[in-house]
Amino acid sequence: MELHEKVADFTIQDDQENTVHLSDFAGKPVILFFYPRADTPGCTIEACGFRDTFTKLQQAGAVVLGISRDTPKAQKKFKEKYDLNYPLLADVDEKVVKQFGVLKEKNMYGKKVMGIERTTFLIGPDQTLLKIFPKVKPEGHAEEVLAAIQGS
């Protein structure tokens, strides 16, 4: 996926088992952050960072969407446990992670496994790709995204 390219619409379930389309958010910038797994340490830090900067992101007009390969039920549990104030998307069939190219081979305790590389995409109001944050470090990431939105 290239910068300034139009992002193809997708359909996915959220943590409430509602069907969500990227096009539902047309007219607003969308922060789509991919994380490896709900309720793991790094993912919790990142998700809570977006929770804590959510008001400022909203004031900037942005929509925040977290996404992983977890089930809607696991996403709901994660959302409730940490009082996350934005939708979590459940990409159980891996369509969206493949669309965005974030499913990578990782080395887990000496074994090669396929997992999500923590990546955030900033999608413009016209659904073009404005910025990619690859290999995200969870600490301070939400502030980094906020700065990018305010600067755009």
Image (cartoon, rainbow, N blue to C red):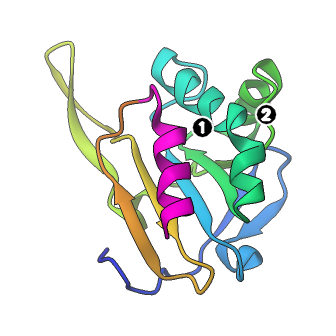
Compare marks 1 and 2 and give the one earlier in the sequence.
1
Q: Which residue is mark 2?
A: 76
Residue at (60% x, 74% y) in the render? 10
Q: Image check: 132 left or right of 46?
A: left
Q: Residue at x 33, y 49 (%)?
A: 103
Q: Amino acid at mark 2?
A: Lys
In depth, the one of 1 and 111 nearer the eye is 1
Residue at 58%, 52% in the rendered image: 91
Label 1 sits on residue: 70
Residue 126 numbered tag? none
Where residue 114 appears, x then y in whole percent? 29, 39
Q: Position of residue 44 (x, y in %)?
A: 58, 22
**Secondary structure beneath disc 1?**
loop
Q: Quadrant of residue 15?
A: top right
Q: Is residue 115 magenta?
A: no
Q: Which residues are magenta?
A: 138-152
Badge 2 local density, few (<14 within 10 Å), some, or many (20+)? many
Residue at image location 67% in from the left, 53% down from the top: 64
Callout count: 2
Q: Is residue 88 visible?
A: yes
Locate residue 3 relative to residue 61 in the image: left or right: left
Q: Secondary structure at mark 2?
A: helix
Q: Quadrant of residue 4?
A: bottom left
19 lies above or below 57 = below
27 is higher (above) or lower (below) than 138: below
Out of 46 and 59, give the one closest to the viewer.
59
> Which amino acid type is shown beneath numbered disc 1?
Asp
Q: Nearer the viewer, residue 140 or 35?
A: 140
